[in-house]
Amino acid sequence: DVSSDNILGDYSTIRRELERYSSVLAQKPELIYLTKCDLLQEEEIQKKLTELQNFTSCKIFCLSSSIMLNIDTLIKHLAEILANYESS
């Protein structure tokens, strides 16, 4: 959630929980989608994106289901992941 006051802490918590659940799953490629990007001004979103980009090398995208921002990109990424999974 891009409106979080502690975006790095949230990401770190998710990664820790994922690692505890399954080290195999935690090693899979990841895409990061920040949700609720319609709630903040572009300047604040960019600040948070930069903060995360300095912390991880993963691709990071903004998403908003209420205004359909990047929903098509999310669907495309999920389709690519499924296609790669099915072909392996």
Image: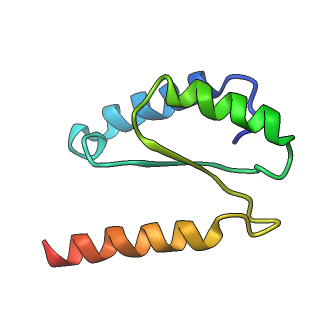
Residue 31 location in percent, x, y? Answer: 44, 50
Q: Is residue 75 placed above or below 26 in the rendered structure? A: below
Q: Is residue 61 placed above or below 16 in the rendered structure? A: below
Q: Quadrant of residue 87?
A: bottom left
Pick the front one: 20 or 14 = 14
Q: Quadrant of residue 67?
A: bottom right
Q: Is residue 34 placed above or below 43 in the rendered structure? A: below
Point out the image quarter for the C terminus: bottom left
Point out the image quarter for the N terminus: top right
Q: Is residue 18 placed above or below 50 in the rendered structure? A: below
Pick the front one: 34 or 50 = 50
Judging from the image, the colouring scheme is: rainbow
Residue 48 location in percent, x, y? Answer: 68, 30
Q: How many marks?
A: 0
Q: Quadrant of residue 41?
A: top right
Q: Residue at x 38, y 48 (%)?
A: 30
Q: Residue at x 32, y 33 (%)?
A: 19
Residue 8 location in percent, x, y? Answer: 58, 24
Seen from this angle, which residue lies furthest left?
88
Residue 25 location in percent, x, y? Answer: 27, 46
Q: With 25 as the anchor, is 50 left or right in this view?
A: right
Q: Residue at x 21, y 77 (%)?
A: 86
Q: Residue at x 74, y 31 (%)?
A: 4
Q: With 71 as the anchor, is 79 left or right in this view?
A: left
